[in-house]
Amino acid sequence: MSSKVLFLCDGYGKDNDATGICVRNVAEEFLKRGYEVFCVFNSGKADCEFEKGSIKFYGVKEALYDRLKHCGDSSSLLKRAFFSLFSRIRHIVVAPFYPDVSFVRSRFFYKKALKVVKQERIDVVIASYRPYEAIYSLIRLKKRFSEKLYCVGYHLDLLTAPNTVNKTVRNIQLLKVKKAIDREQRCVDLLVLPSALDNENFRFPNARFADFPIYNPDVKEIPFDLPYSNDYVNLVYIGSLNSQNRNPQYMVSMLDKMGSVSGKKIVWHIWGKVEQAVLESIKLSEHIAYHGLLNNANVYYALKKSDFIVNISNEQTLNMVPSKIFQSFSAKRPIVNIISSTEDVSIPYFERYGDSLNVYKHQGEDANVQKIKEFLENKLSQEIKGNEDLLRKCTPAFFVDTFEDFRRR
């Protein structure tokens, strides 16, 4: 069995990059098992090569579109207008190539991967979506080396969930995605897909299903000075918030109406990137304590030491399962899950977890206030066992076991 594995990915291990953290976790599991690990990744403004933590990294600079993204947030009207025009033209140009929307960069990504495969004599390549450049390179590598190279397509994000508002454009994209997945599964040796896609449409002979490898049962807590108080009921949310997809305002309204639980004031502690307009709005509530960004190494400790975890489910990307929910499950704390749509694919995960309350916005505020209050009162200071079977599928070890078991066949 091969001892050399090459990862093709976007970011690697960045605190604000969920897929990058997942790739890092899996890569470290391979290292534990004696494999040599290499990585081709998105290195930002310039190509680079370096070695860190027993892994050799080969960076491919970002696409022109990504280098210009900052113009869209600029205070300069001219820069914003330029980026808007550039984006419109780009959408027209890349439409025929979807989902390979960075088709020029894909060629550079492939060349770098090819160089590493030849230079390091790699015989296992694992490509993580996103970006699609990684999948494009994986397919070309497999066609070039055939049986000499064992290729794995690893989909952390759902390729089947384009974040497009226009229904006509979205339907066209979905048709192209279906063809792209079919092309990939016919080419690669193993295709690992999110469990949310475990249905008859995706049960290919070479397909296996897993969840985000975000949970490590051997993880060590890294304590820090928490802002929690025994005088309060401490709720926590760690992640991004915005007005379009994850809006916390409904939960804030619930807390304002509730006030306290079991004679204790409720304080909702929030860490993460929060849209400025949303932040200004929620900070008007006496129940909100915003603490800025949190180092990824401290997330588990902050979740585990809370009284309750709050999850704000997606409003637009209903077919996307957020990676952070598995980290919440691993903390084994009761969870209040605010749901915008019954079509949210993450709902079954919370039902399987058990110690959670699904709060549907359409059921009305008064009824939901009472439901949340009863849940907080009943679960306060209660020991939670969690769901080990659910957590098993979101470990790095599960992915590597899946890979090794399938390859032995």
Image (cartoon, rainbow, N blue to C red):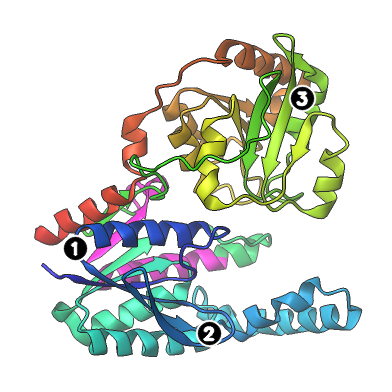
How far separated are the C-alphas under marks 1 and 2? Answer: 30 Å
Q: Is residue 221 above or below residue 335?
A: below
Is the residue under label 3 in contact with that under label 2 (CB below 8 Å)?
Answer: no
Q: Is residue 106 above or below residue 169?
A: below
Mark 3 surroundings: few (<14), some (14-19) or many (≥20) residues within 10 A: many
Left or right, 141 with respect to 359, comes to: left
User: Which badge, 1 or 3, is on the more N-terminal residue?
Assistant: 1
In which quadrant is the N terminus drawn?
Answer: bottom left
Which residue is nearer to you in this view: 178 or 31?
31
Which amino acid, mark 3? Leu
Mark 2 surroundings: few (<14), some (14-19) or many (≥20) residues within 10 A: some
Left or right, 140 with respect to 332, comes to: left
Q: In this view, does 51 lie above or below 165?
A: below
Q: Nearer the viewer, mark 1 or mark 3?
A: 1
The question of residue 182 being in magenta is answered with yes
Q: Which of marks 1 and 2 is in front?
A: 1
Which amino acid, mark 1? Gly
Mark 2, residue position:
61
Q: What stretch is highlighted in magenta?
A: 172-201
Which structural element holds mark 2? loop
Mark 1, residue position:
34
Which amino acid, mark 2? Lys
How far separated are the C-alphas under marks 1 and 3? Answer: 50 Å
Mark 3, residue position:
255
Residue 225 x, y percent position in the rendering: 62, 38
Q: Is residue 320 visible?
A: no
